[in-house]
Amino acid sequence: MKQPFYVLYEDNHIIIVNKAAGVLVQGDATGDKTLSDYVKDYIKEKYNKPGDVFLGTVHRLDRPVSGIVVFARTSKALERMNELFRRRDVQKTYWAVVGKKPEKKSGKLTHWLVKNEEKNTVKAFDTEVKGSQKAELNYRYLGEINHYHLLEVNPITGRPHQIRVQLATMGCPIRGDVKYGYPRLNPEGNINLHARRLYFVHPVKKEPILCKAPLPENPFWEEFLELETEEIKTENLDFLY
């Protein structure tokens, strides 16, 4: 991906983009330009909007992660999208490349996570501890290419660093994720975690929305496309959800 984002879907209420790895969703101490800033610039230019552009952040991806991010274009849409995420009426699917094959081809992981705000790291526990949040995800093994393994991950909860720390706790840290135990950085400084697909019912139009984010334009990532077997048809949407 040569630019910060590509638009996957947009209407008067929401805009869904495919974020490049390395781009911040919201500002931090670095002061680097954010995805929110880039998308506001896009809307301002495309629709010739005077003054400030409203853009509500519905959810986030970590900086080194690529894939789908949803923004709200009105306060009403933001309120309704927040409610969808709060009720977990959104199906999120990620692709993760790991260096070690999991013991089971599929399974559910449940941990209790505690975030260290100072170090920006998360620790996973098998049982509830003080100040922890419950985290759950389902995973499925898709196959192996060149000694790397592709997992499809469906988070049930939406905790910070959840997929990264839960897969690492299972013994399968994500390629390039030295923060959670992978032995070396990727050349590009990203990690091989990609928000691949998102499905929900539009909070205003009440129509099903299914977005799929193309993989980063990277030869390593693109090899894994041959492992994708899923064919999504409109009549399967209720089943998917």
Image: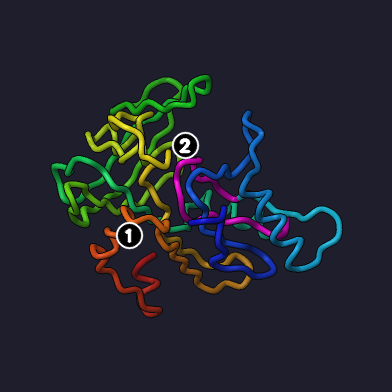
Residue 219's image quarter? bottom left
Residue placed at 26% from the left, 43% from the top?
98
Dot 1 amino acid type: Glu
Residue placed at 35% from the left, 42% from the top?
136
158 on left or right of 204: left
**CB-based contact (under 8 Å), mark 2 and mark 1:** no
Residue placed at 67% from the left, 60% from the top?
77
| Magenta segment | 58-75
Residue placed at 50% from the left, 43% from the top?
22
Residue tagged by mark 2? 160
79 on left or right of 197: right
Residue tagged by mark 1? 222
The one of 92 and 147 positioned closer to us in this rendering: 147
Residue 123 placement (x, y as % from top left): 37, 25
Residue 123 vs 109, above or below: the answer is above
The one of 110 and 189 positioned closer to us in this rendering: 189
- Mark 2–mark 1 distance (CA, rounded to whole Å): 27 Å
The one of 184 and 195 positioned closer to us in this rendering: 184
